[in-house]
Amino acid sequence: MTARLWPLLVAVHRALTAGVAVSAAIHTAHGWSPAADRHLDHQLVRREAMERLKPWGASPDDLADELTDPLTVRQLELINTSTANLGLPMSGLLLRTPTDVLRVWRSDDGSLPDAATDGLRAFYRQAPSRQLQLTLDDDPTGARTARGHLALLWADAGAALIRFDLVRPGGHIGRRVQVDWHIDLLDRIDRTAA
């Protein structure tokens, strides 16, 4: 899973890292405390990340120099930024590949947002990955399999990322999200970047 998504995960990490730096620079330049308005801090990170991830909406031929796996290059979509999303820790980034849907959220504690809306409940509802291993890649009927749903959770402190976790939800009970698996990628990404 992580090997297939690695170019995308690296791009998101770079975009978030740049966003954290932009937010820190703006706050420093104005003498503002990020803690005084956490929504502004998060939205500045989100805005810079959106700009840096725009190339993921281009066709694979346009990105051949930057990416090793053109099959993972697909579109970047922005989740509706209406006031309905203001309760999420970091709303607004949705990336799609041919095999996966990846939502990017800020999470201090590494937990997914509650299954409080129909959209989130639908996103969390999927078969556990161990059940998916029983299906064959080449379906003789030609039926298309549903994309896997993944969440990328990040957090920052002191102008640096301190969390970068890939999480596969496995349903929900009421508002409580069930997690199929949770992988901390921060050290792995940092080692690759070094």
Image (cartoon, helix red, strand yellow):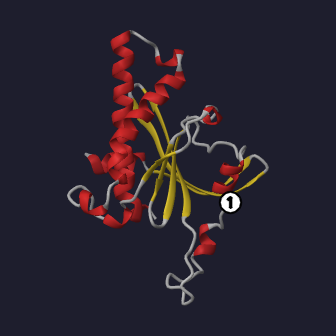
State which quarter of the image contains the C terminus. Answer: top left
Q: Position of residue 137 (x, y in %)?
A: 50, 81
Circle 1 is placed at which residue position? 125
Query: Type of residue at label 1?
Result: Arg
Q: Callout 1: helix, strand or loop?
A: loop
Residue at the spot x=66%, y=67% of the render? 127
In the picture as drawn, the residue positioned furthest to the left comes out as 65
Can you see residue 16? no
Is residue 6 or residue 65 the one in the foreground?
A: 65
Residue at the spot x=39%, y=39% of the render? 49
Q: Quadrant of residue 147?
A: bottom right
Q: Position of residue 37 (x, y in %)?
A: 53, 18
In the picture as drawn, the residue positioned furthest to the top comes out as 31
Is residue 73 or residue 191 the one in the foreground?
A: 73
Residue at the spot x=41%, y=45% of the render? 186
Q: Is residue 27 left or right of residue 166?
A: left
Q: Position of residue 80 (x, y in %)?
A: 56, 41
Q: Is residue 186 left or right of residue 183?
A: left
Q: Residues within 10 Å of mark 1 (few under 14, many from 20)?
A: some
In the picture as drawn, the residue positioned furthest to the bottom comes out as 140
Position of residue 163 relative to residue 129, above or below, is above
